[in-house]
Amino acid sequence: MIQEDVVCSFCGCLCDDIRVETNDEGIVKAKGACRLGSSKILGHGPGHGRISKPMIRQDGELVEVEYQVAYDRAARILKAAKRPLLYGWASTVCEAHEEGVLLAEEVGAVIDSTATVCHGPSVIGVEEKGLAGATLGQVKNRADLILFWGCNPAEAHPRHMRRYSSNSTGRFTPEGRKGRTVIVIDVRETRTARLADRFIRIDPGTDYQVISALRLILAGKAEILGDEVCGISKGKLVDLVDILKKARFGAIFFGLGLTHSRGRYKNIDCALSLTAELNAHTKFMIMPMRGHYNVAGIGQVMAWEGGYPMSVDYSRGAPYFNPGETAACDLLARREADAALIIAADPASNFPRSIVEALAEIPVIQIDPYENPTTLLADVVIPCAIAGVEVEGTAYRMDGLPLRMRKVIEPVHPSDEEILKEIRESARRLPDDH
Amino acid sequence: MIIKGGVVYDPANGVLGEEMDICIDAGAVAEAAGGPTIDARGMLVLPGGVDAHSHIAGPKLNAGRIMRPDDGRIGTEPRRGLCRPCTGYTVPNSSAIGYRYARMGYTTVFEAATPIIESRHTHEELEAIPILDKGALTLFGSNWTVMECVGEKDLPKLSAYVAWGLRASRGYGVKIVNPGGGEAWGFGSNVKGLHDPVPEFNVTPAEIIHELARANERLCLPHSIHLHFNNLGKPGNYSTAIETLDLLKDIVPSRDRQAVHVTHMQFSAYGGTGWRDFESKAPEIADYYNKNDHATMDMGQIIFGSATTMTADGPLEYANARLLHQKWSNHDIELEESSGVVPLVYIRGSPVNAVQWAIGLELALLTEDPWKVLLTTDNPNGGPFVKYPEVIALLMSHKRREEEMAKLPELLSKRSVIGSIERELGWGEIAVMTRAAPAHVLGLKEKGHLGVGADGDVSIYEIDPREVDPGSDPALVERAFTQAKYTIKAGEVVSRDGEIAGIPQGRTFWTDANVPEEDMARLMASLKEKFEKYYSIQMSNYMVQEAYLSRPVAVRAGVEVAQ
Ligand code: SF4
Ligand SMILES: [Zn+2]
């Protein structure tokens, strides 16, 4: 069978034009998807490290059990914990996120997403300054200048440039790449940089100074600057500001190179300010390059459900948000979390080593279709259907645009949403003083 | 259920302060009913509150929440009883929106603006709001397809697009915000007035408004066009308001209702040439409304204190942010709209804010017919909806207004006429402005009244309108309206003395309008091209899927209904 316009469930581009071919064996083709997307979409079979049965660790070994046994064990762990952490959420649908918030309310947990180790600083920057954004279609139809800062879409979001940004065509951009100026600012010459019209290499950790210099020049205060800013000649920066100002519609995309270098959220604050200030001269927007396909969605769901987009502590019954205190890594670093439910993420691979060690010391429940390094730390392992391939539901693209993920094949396992609901039901049945 | 012996105001049915019983059977008002009895003796009984213009769901709301963790903290309430935890004051979480409206006696609230392509988000949030019945108005004012149909003078095709857009967004009515301005803002400019052509499209705001109004009536939609004027928020803009209203005098409503609803009129009733000589032109606007019958408005009253402005008027928000040195979010939407969010504080010491405060009240007090003026704060643009009781008290009590004016700059008396207005609205007029009129303006036949067959939505307030003189006791009025003794939704008590007692899932109204097949076919050809060349998503992924409305109510409309 052929299914048209399937939404890819790998990266924040959420390409929705994939042609998926299935037969009795499962998915055999994902036409239109990039390398990353097709390996995700095709990687559903048992040969791809799928977990087949729920498991519970007994005497150091994971032993297969029935689902209900795993649900009850998970519920007891969360209920017994003083400071349970519900973490992950980037690679599942919003319907599961909503269940996750309900579970956090039920067991008094801290709920946090992988944003905490990727675009968390961007969120904090937005709290400081707001964000001048747009949907990706605006970029496609209007942008004649694109600036990639500390991101490498050519490798991390392979279809971004063709579909939405530098190489796309639209109403006011009929010439596509030819009619656009593409600039890359990064600490190394990435593939994206090699495709650009202009590459400005900066020293690691100097983003804040460079953006600040651009803002000064834009404000007409170039004379304050010395001849060089962090190794870049002032002339080059003055030129750059000139190019930015002359654009008809400018778009800045930024990635972890900006959020995770020295300065972190201050870098974002500064970049958001630069964007707002450029609007006094021409039209400008800015967008974080969100990684996992629905890491934006968990932020949206948490915001409408509890008021804040990440790192929310429900232990006092009311949502409390204080990143730096209530983020997953903070909690684990302080050895405060005493149980964790990990869903649709692999912190054992992505957290700093000392934080992974903290995670290894506490009971861990994992909900995931696949075995991954986190499985090695887990005490309860619950296999789920692959959201976005075997389960339909909502996901938010990096620009905040929501799409409905399709179910392309029938699942064998329950969905994240069903699993979370069962755990919550089980937790409800436990007495409070458990 | 029987509500016994209350003092009932049901102005849609000519009931003004009669002691009578209200029976609710199977969720609707009935001649007789069994079941529990509520003793409402000595209490004010009204139809459930209806808010026809409030920002309660969707991308703008979340943008506001995410950029304002400070606001989140203000309204924090822990999980308790049936209630999930709450946060926020001007931008509360979805749960809080449902509970707080219900506590005040409101049972139906319409989201004022949803961009078609992001309506999935709007519906996700609407679904997350407990208790209330709701709907969303769909944005059409800067839409490429709309502007092209207007340019081609193809009314049938435009109507087909409106019908399709309402279906795609599962929207209820046609919202127009700063028509043409959203498109111009795509390249950082704006339209300056009604006859200033939209760049690249060669149509004017006047043409967009007029043709959308005609399409609206051709489709016989339950609601009229719902209009946010050009030049909103700018000194001197009252002339744009009157010019726009004049433009719509020839529109013949297809149903028994207005030809145009003007939203948050307060922001469009400004005189002066700048902020220094800024003054109220509410008397001119009210005078216009007193002499003409084709339009209604809602107040857009401001409340001193914190607000979060959010609107599809992107250039307005940019101007706000620059003027007030505030943080600024903007979100432009391909082929359709712009939008922005800016937090701000209305300050008593500011002459401009004081005049804005006066304008909202003047509009309501100088317009003779309360059916033409809905009570709103354009939540949360003028202030949060939880402040409606304060607005009610101000409208019902000259004394309350004088107390407030004493705290405001003296300049106010030169820039507005609020001090000279003696009028005090009565219980019946408040019932019109908060119940009967919003339901009528929206075209919701089963809302806003208590006649047999109406929805069993009732609010009961612990205040005896025969005993209390609101003019001299405004505090009693404000307190009573802040917390209904009972709020009843479809025959179920959902709030009692401020405690949430039931959490039914509300319904979502949308308008399903039919158009002739040949019009739709012509439209599809041009839409297909748009998706192939310009949209960043596929047409088959565009429509809001059925999964997003758990309790939909499709209101039938369309060209056949009109004939
Ligand atoms: S760019 Fe991202 S969303 Fe698109 S096909 Fe590749 S992995 Fe999937
Ligand atoms: Zn509004």
Image (tube, coloured by chain):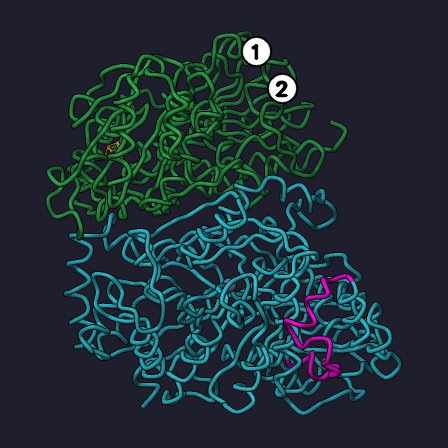
- As drawn, the chain in cyan is B
Which x, y percent locates residue A432?
A: 74, 32
Please tell me how crowded label 2 is: few (under 14), some (14-19), or many (20+) other residues with Cα within 10 Å: many
Is residue A176 visible in this depiction of the protein? Answer: yes
Identify the residue at image location x=35%, y=58%: B337
- Which chain does tag 1 point to? A
What residue occupies the far right of the structure in this picture?
B467
Q: Residue at x 26, y 47 (%)?
A: A137
Residue A46 occupies which quadrant of the picture?
A: top left
- According to the picture, the residue beneath numbered tag 2 turns out to be A337
In the rendered view, tell whether residue B311 sits above or below residue B47. above
Could you say which is closer to the camera, residue A262 or residue B246?
Answer: B246
For the residue pair B179 and A62, the one nearer the viewer reads as: B179
Residue B410 painted magenta: yes
Is B450 placed above or below B313 here? below
Q: Assess mark 1: CB under 8 A from ligand 1?
A: no
Residue A159 falls left or right of residue A203: left
Residue B374 location (% of width, % of height)? 59, 76
In the picture, the quarter occupied by the N terminus of chain B is bottom right
Q: Are marks 2 and 1 in contact (CB under 8 Å)?
A: yes
Where is residue B475 shown, x and y percent of the image? 83, 67
Considering depth in this image, is B102 or B475 the residue closer to the camera?
Answer: B475
User: Chain letter for green?
Assistant: A
The amino acid marked with disc number 1 is Ala
Place of residue A72 in the rendered image (x, y in percent of width and height, measured from the top left):
60, 29
> Which residue lies under the disc numbered 1?
A358
